[in-house]
Amino acid sequence: MPLPYAFIRPLLFRLDPEVAHDLSLRALRGMHQCGLSLLLAEPRVIDPVRLMGLEFPNRVGLAAGLDKHGEAIDALAALGFGFVEIGTVTPRPQVGNPRPRLFRLTSAQALVNRMGFNNEGLDAFLRNVRRSRREVPLGLNIGKNASTPIESALDDYASCLRAVHAHADYITVNVSSPNTAGLRRLQGDDALETLLGGLAVERERLVQDQGRRVPMLLKVAPDLQPAQVHALADALVRHGMDGVIATNTTVSREGVEGLAHAEQAGGLSGAPLRERANGVISLLRGHLGASYPIIGVGGIMDARDALEKQRCGADLVQLYTGLIYQGPRLVRECAQALAASQRRAA
């Protein structure tokens, strides 16, 4: 029987959020290595789904950002996820933004982060990936270094693509973090054309060299206007992107005004993001049609939220902030609810 998270959370929430994050990852990894994963979560829900040519054991994944370096891939997968996404990784190591850079808005079940793509660089990242057992599909999330001019962003993304292509089950191109100056400009028409066009060419070279085609997705912001979402969706199709992840964190503070830490710079995640993310998912599904792969993320705090993502058009969902507030049981509850929904629809 798993340890009740309700007993653990108060201890973690007494710590600085980033310290608690790092301690939790180390503890997860240590317990998994000792064969104690069943103390943290029940066995994985089996609800197989095929998407983008990949077989997912269930529809609930871990969003990028929780394990930036790929240090705890197997331990996180053992919490019952149907897939795990790690990163964001950049070509060169970078420390990210100064601390403190992660803040809890507990009464709103939210976080604000301005981590800034802190990571150990491609070499360390890939060492960790190669050590993992890969029990579920693994997504590798790529970005650009903060010191790279936005005009040269394609160079960084292409460098990451070349490095991770042979090791990924899918690759996510992250152009939507609000914590790297200018990054969201890459979602604009001309910049997006340049980036996606260049990556499409690079991927075709890799397909020819390696004999395998790895699905490539774009992770988008929740703060786009409908016309921008439609233009972005058209670009995804035009450049052969295999799917879209909607959404990243928001720069809006709607719903958290006046709360402690709400004024902190960075991206807001958790419950206040839910409706904004759902709106983008609905716009994408309406524009892209029924068959285009969409992964929904943002504000999933219980099984009802996962089902709402599905109703808006998401094929799969991802968790992050909900996991911090609700613990590993959230993975199973969401996976069970989505599986039951699919059975009723069949």
Image (tube, helix red, strand yellow):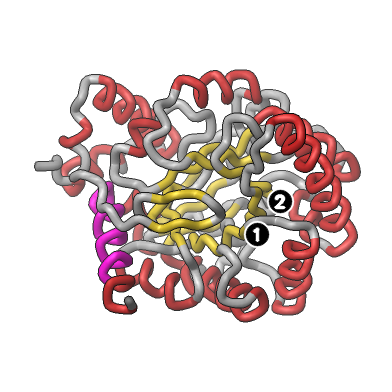
Q: Nearer the viewer, residue 7 or 210?
A: 210
Taking the image as shown, residue 313 lies to the left or right of residue 327, namely: right
**Membership of 265 in magenta stretch:** no
Q: Residue at x 65, y 56 (%)?
A: 242
Could you say whether the residue bearing mark 2 is in a helix, strand or loop? Answer: loop
Q: Residues under labels 1 and 2: Cα distance?
A: 7 Å
In the rendered structure, the answer to whether residue 143 lies left or right of residue 238 reads left
Is residue 146 among the parts visible in the rendering?
Answer: no
Circles 1 and 2, Cβ within 8 Å, touching? The answer is yes
Q: Which residue is mark 2?
A: 175
Report the residue at 25% width, 44% height from top: 9
Residue at the spot 64% in from the left edge and 61% down from the top edge: 221
Choose the circle earlier in sequence order: 1 or 2: 2
* Marker count (numbered): 2
Q: Quadrant location of residue 142?
A: top right
- Identified by mark 2, the residue type is Val
Q: Which mark is residue 26?
A: none
Report helix, strand or loop for mark 1.
Answer: strand
Q: Which residues are magenta?
A: 326-340
> Residue 23's quadrant in the figure?
top left
Categorize mark 2 by other alpha carbons within 10 Å: few (<14), some (14-19), many (20+).
many
Three-letter amino acid code of the residue under disc 1: Val
The image quadrant where one finds the C terminus is: bottom left
Placement of 54 over or under 276, stated as above or below: above
Task: Name the residue tied to disc 1.
Answer: 220
Counting from the top left corner in percent of width and height, residue 67 is at 47, 35
Label 1: how many residues lie within 10 Å, few (<14), some (14-19) or many (20+)?
many
Q: Residue at x 88, y 39 (%)?
A: 152
Q: Magenta part mainly helix, strand or loop?
A: helix
Q: Quadrant of the N terminus?
A: top left
Q: Locate residue 333, reporting x and y percent.
A: 25, 59
